[in-house]
Image (cartoon, helix red, strand yellow):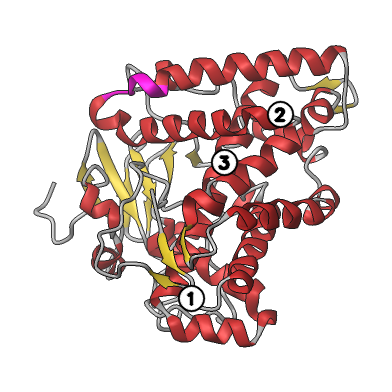
């Protein structure tokens, strides 16, 4: 590999804490290549990212073979809409979409508001709040757990399993899976397999039951496919929304003039959510492998190598976004790629947007002013290569 004129190291905690200063170098030219654990191409420019994400015929979502990957795989080797190519992906998405409709999401709004109000009522009235523990962590996991029909007594355990699995994903390439991650995988899969078994015998008015009965003519989800999708819903359905809320609140604290703008005009909240997704996205990157050697933006990406699709960098591409380093709650248009593009566009995007909007609006209503409790304190990010989320966010609300 040629000498690098850029820095990219997702195993570096400092890099993960603030990758944004390193993106301009990647955006100035064609996709760059380096050797991580295997030859890797960094696709950063907006147009290149969109091109790859739409080219599912030449770029597969399958992951490279890593000796210990099957040990941590929470899907048990079963295909999911996140990890499968057509025609398997097409079949799975068609089936699960029937149980995850826009109408079902709209019907959740009153309950999401109720949960948010309840969580914030427990927050201290002293004007100080740790926003991740108070709201960003519990809200999405309660919503997705209730959708699945999981007992309220198990919500905290659900979140712990999710955290342990996500943390293990972040370190597995460098050190192998953690003991906590391996235990979480086994316990979560066992728990959900039992829940599926119960719903198969006694259907209820919940998402697991809907998925059990989801059929298309003679086609249906297999037992392994159903378990894999429910696991995916838990991980993707709460981790990403947790990060949207936390990262969004941080952006409002660091940009008080934009926070005030939003307070004065709540109609801007939908646009503000899109800007939070663009400016500091919950999912920083995704992975593809070219099936055949393919030229992207002037760089040959060898077949069977790894391509890191840097969503967060594409969202800061000045060729597509005017003044991309500026956080603007009224930005329009705002065609960010934080939910992906093409056939793998995030199925849960409407739910994430709804939860994020309710959470942010509720925080603005409860606290007359949001600012970092200690602006000099170093923020801690949870260890994950692809996901960007705060461990804690201590705010002063008055």
* Left/right of residue 151 with respect to residue 246 in the rendered view: right
Please give the range of residues in magenta: 176-181
Residue lying at 75% horizontally and 54% vertically, measured from the top left:
114
Q: Which residue is mark 3?
A: 236
Q: Quadrant of residue 302?
A: top left
Give how far across and how far down residue 355 sits, in percent.
66, 56
Q: Quadrant of residue 334?
A: bottom right
Q: Quadrant of residue 142?
A: top right
Q: Nearer the viewer, residue 41 or 251?
A: 251
- Say above or below: 261 vs 247: below
- Say above or below: 73 vs 145: above
Q: Give the label on residue 261, or none.
A: none
Please tell me whether mark 1 or mark 2 is closer to you in this view. 1
Q: Give the label on residue 150, or none.
A: 2
Q: Which residue is mark 1?
A: 398
Q: Is residue 180 magenta?
A: yes
* Left/right of residue 170 with respect to residue 320 in the rendered view: left
Inter-mark Cα distance, 3 to 1? 33 Å
Give how far across and how far down residue 365 sits, in percent.
64, 73
Q: Nearer the viewer, residue 358 or 24?
A: 358
Inter-mark Cα distance, 3 to 2? 16 Å
Please tell me whether mark 3 or mark 2 is closer to you in this view. 2
Residue lying at 69% horizontally and 44% vertically, measured from the top left:
143
Query: Mark 1: few, some, or many residues within 10 Å (few <14, many ≥20)?
Result: few
Give how far across and how far down residue 339 sits, in percent.
57, 55
In what element is the residue under mark 2? loop
Disc nearer the start of the sequence (1/2): 2
Query: Could one spot residue 68 in this view of the protein?
Result: yes
Residue lying at 38% horizontally and 22% vertically, measured from the top left:
180
């Amino acid at each position: 590999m040629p000498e690098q004129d850029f820095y990219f190291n997702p195993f570096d905690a400092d890099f993960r804490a603030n990758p944004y200063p390193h993106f301009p170098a990647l955006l100035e030219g064609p996709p760059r290549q380096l050797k991580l654990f295997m030859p890797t191409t960094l696709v950063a420019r907006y147009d290149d990212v969109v091109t790859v994400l739409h080219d599912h015929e030449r770029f597969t979502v399958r992951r490279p073979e890593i000796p210990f990957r099957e040990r941590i795989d929470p899907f048990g080797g079963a295909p999911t809409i996140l990890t499968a190519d057509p025609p398997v992906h097409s079949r799975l998405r068609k089936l699960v979409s029937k149980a995850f409709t826009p109408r079902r999401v709209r019907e959740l709004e009153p309950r999401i508001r109720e949960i948010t109000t309840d969580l914030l009522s427990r927050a201290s009235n002293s004007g100080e709040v740790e926003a991740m523990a108070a709201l960003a962590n519990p809200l999405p996991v309660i919503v997705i757990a209730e959708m699945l029909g999981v007992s309220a007594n198990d919500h905290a355990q659900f979140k712990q399993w999710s955290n342990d699995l996500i943390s293990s994903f972040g370190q597995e390439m460098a050190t192998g899976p953690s003991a906590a991650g391996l235990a979480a995988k086994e316990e979560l899969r066992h728990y959900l397999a039992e829940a599926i078994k119960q719903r198969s015998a006694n259907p209820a008015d919940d998402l697991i039951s809907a998925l059990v009965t989801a059929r298309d003519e003679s086609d249906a989800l297999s037992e392994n496919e159903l378990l894999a999708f429910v696991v995916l819903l838990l991980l993707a359905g709460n981790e990403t929304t947790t990060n949207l809320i936390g990262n969004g609140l941080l952006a409002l604290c660091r940009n008080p003039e934009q926070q005030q703008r939003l307070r004065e005009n709540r109609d801007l909240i939908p646009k503000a959510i899109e800007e939070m997704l663009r400016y500091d996205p919950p999912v920083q990157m995704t992975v593809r492998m070219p099936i055949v050697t393919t030229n992207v933006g002037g760089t040959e990406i060898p077949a069977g190598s790894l391509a890191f699709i840097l969503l967060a960098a594409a969202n800061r591409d000045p060729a597509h976004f005017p003044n991309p380093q500026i956080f603007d709650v009224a930005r329009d248009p705002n065609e960010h790629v934080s939910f992906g593009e093409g056939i793998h566009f995030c199925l849960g995007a409407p739910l994430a947007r709804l939860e994020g909007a309710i959470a942010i609006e509720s925080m603005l209503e409860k606290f007359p002013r949001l600012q970092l409790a200690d602006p000099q304190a170093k923020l801690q990010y949870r260890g994950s290569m692809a996901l960007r989320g705060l461990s804690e966010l201590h705010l002063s609300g008055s």
